[in-house]
Amino acid sequence: MPQPVGVILAGGQALRMGGGDKGLLTLGGKTVLAHVIDRLEPQVAAVALNANGDPARFGRAHPVVADSVEGFAGPLAGVLAGLDWAQTQGASHIVTAAADTPFFPCDLVPRLMLAAEGHDIALAATPDPERGLARHPTFGLWPVALRDDLRAALNEGVRKVVQWTDRHKTALAEFPATPFDPFFNINTPDDLARAEALLA
C-alpha cells in the first residue's frame, strides 16, 4: 500500500466549548490544530482539513475540503470529503485524525496500515476496562475505492461511523492507553486544562 494522505476532521460543532473551532483553541502557545498537524504530517504524503464555513480561518498552509452532504452529517461526511479529495490527488487511501486530539500516537499511520492488511478499513482502538476495546472511529485508514459506497450510505441516512464500518471488513489497531489514552480529546474547558497539564 502506498503512503496514504491525511485528512484532519475539523467539522465538529464544539457545542460543549460554546461553539467555534476546537482546533483553533490555544494549547501550549500554539493551536490544538497545529499540534495535530505536527503529529500527522510526518506520517502521510499530504494533509487536508475537512471543515465547513469560511476556510480562510485556518490560514492557507493546507487545502480545506467541505462536506458534500447537506446538514450536519457528522464525521462520516468528513471521511467522504477526504476520500473525494484523495481521489484528485491520486491517493488510494486516507488516514483521518480529529482536530481536537493533540496527543494521538506518532506511529498511528504505520500501525493502521499493518492492521488493515486483508481488510477494507482499520480503526484505532485502546483497551477499555468496561468494553474490552474502545474504538476511536475518527482515527482510521479508509480506501478511496469505498467512497461511492459511503456516499450511498450517507444518502440513506447512515450517520454513525461504526454503523457503516461494520458493513465492511474492518480491523482494529490497538494502541496502549498508558500513561493516558492518546486519543483523549478536548471537549470542555476542563479538558483543555487537562491537556495543558499533560503537555507540561
Image: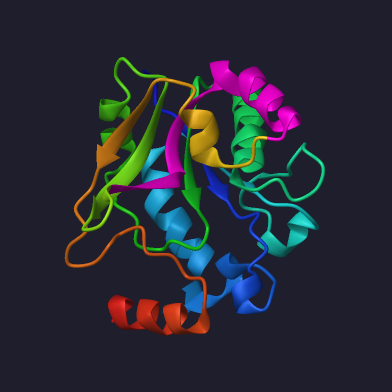
User: In percent of the image, x 65 and y 31: which residue is there?
Assistant: 85
User: In percent of the image, x 65 and y 67: which residue is there?
Assistant: 21
User: In percent of the image, x 42 and y 56: which residue is there?
Assistant: 38
Give the total number of marks visible in the rendering. Answer: 0
**66 to the left or right of 102:** right
- The residue at the far front in this view is 130
Q: Is residue 160 magenta?
A: no
Q: In the image shown, does 53 or 176 lie closer to the viewer?
A: 176
Image location (x, y in percent) of residue 81: 67, 36
Q: Looking at the rendering, which quadrant does residue 118 occupy?
A: top left
Q: Which quadrant would the C terminus be assigned to in this image?
A: bottom left
Name above or below for residue 46 compared with residue 23.
above
User: In percent of the image, x 21 and y 58: which residue is there?
Assistant: 129
Q: Looking at the rendering, which quadrant does residue 191 occupy?
A: bottom left
**163 to the left or right of 183:** right
Colour convention of the picture: rainbow
Q: Which quadrant would the N terminus be assigned to in this image?
A: top left
Chain part drawn in magenta: 133-157
Image location (x, y in percent) of residue 97: 47, 48
Q: In the image shown, does 148 or 24 lie closer to the viewer?
A: 148
Q: In the image shown, does 162 or 118 lie closer to the viewer?
A: 162
Any part of residue 63 in sight = yes
Any part of residue 46 in sight = no
Image location (x, y in percent) of residue 95: 45, 37
Q: Is residue 145 magenta?
A: yes
Name above or below for residue 19 compared with residue 135.
below
